[in-house]
Amino acid sequence: MNTIINDRKKDDFDEEDEEVNISKAYPYQYTKRNPELKASHPRNVDIQTLSASNQQTLLPFFTLLQNLHDNHHYSNSLIFNIDEFSLRLSDSFSTLVFHPSDMPAGFSKTPMNMPNATLVVAAAADGYSLKSVVLWPCRKLPDELRLVLSSQLDVWGENEGWMTEALFLKYAEEVLLPGITQRRETSKRSDERCLLLLDSHSSRAQPDLWKRFADSSIDVVTFVPHTTHIAQPLDRGVFIVFKKTINANYEAPSSSSVVLRREALADVLPQALQTSLFPSTIKSSFAKSGVLSHQWHEVLAKLPKEPSVTLKKRTKRFDYFGKLITDEEFLLEYKKRKG
């Protein structure tokens, strides 16, 4: 701040004038005197995220979505987004710390060797949500976590506390596909097409499951890597509210007891999930992401036209990022390339 002020001073006055030293409170006092100004903390942005956050990168993705909307006229009740939210408890932090794959401002990184659990959420554009699932890293479910079980939240005791191919398949078979079928039956249109939006996590790379989705009239589109903070509905609102609610209400136990930690989590998890999955929050999240028909222009308008950072191009390889992975031709080509 001192450097900025003195540089500005040299432009306006005599360069030989004495330098000005200001207090650390000056920025706060200055913005308080000038309410039209807004102070914010800088945030760390991964260079790949910075490189991907532009119109040039995202236009093909939104064009693909718009073509699908034009061809199939999806109902908002059958436009779904599924994503995970990683939960981590640490001895060295006084609060619950989260770290998703695309890290927005305010999230703290934690050591990778710490155990974690994962919250799986699926929401539809009309404000509806399927049953959420917590993947907890133990085969036998602890008694204190049984307290959170409800019609809207389940806890699965598993060997891993993160999403794997086997767990994603289980989630698709036990939660997602039955949920979509129920929604179709409610609308009395069993053949109505569904749009499913997924990130490109390795657990999704299951061509046999993609074929099952295609046979069930479910069009699956993956996000472009490092752009979910822009285009993924759950990241645009639901998970932001969830994180704020957890951090505001979670009280870290004075003891390092694992049981007490689980009890503390069980106390706040249902409320945080219910608050973040209000229909109005879900609808707002979809609107902000631009994935609904003709709502992406405003999202792109806020982005630079070209990458602000150019990364060295990698060898082009066949992938499933930013694609309609249930397309018949794509499925055949993917299986062929993967052997």
Image (tube, rainbow, N blue to C red):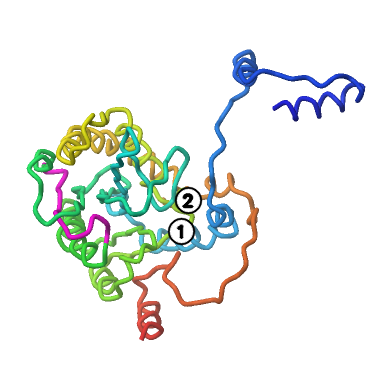
Determine whether, in the image, residue 6 is placed left or right of residue 169.
right
- Which residue is disc 2 drawn over? 294
Spot occupied by residue 151 in the image (x, y as percentages of width and height): 11, 43
State the residue lying farthest toward the top. Answer: 33
Q: Main secondary structure of the magenta part?
A: loop
Q: Residue at x 22, y 37 (%)?
A: 256
Front one among 168 and 60 = 168
Q: Secondary structure at mark 2?
A: loop
C-beta proximity under 8 Å, tags 1 and 2? yes
Quadrant of the snapshot with the C terminus: bottom left
Total label count?
2
* Inter-mark Cα distance, 1 to 2: 7 Å
Q: What stretch of residues is rendered in magenta?
A: 150-163
Check disc 1 and give the amino acid type. Gln
Residue 93, image quadrant = top left
| 295 relative to 221, above or below | above
Determine whether, in the image, residue 10 is placed left or right of residue 123.
right
Q: Report crowding for label 2: few under 14, some 14 to 19, many 20 or more residues within 10 A (C-alpha).
A: some
Check disc 2 and give the amino acid type. His
- Which residue is disc 1 drawn over? 66
Q: Residue at x 73, y 26 (%)?
A: 2
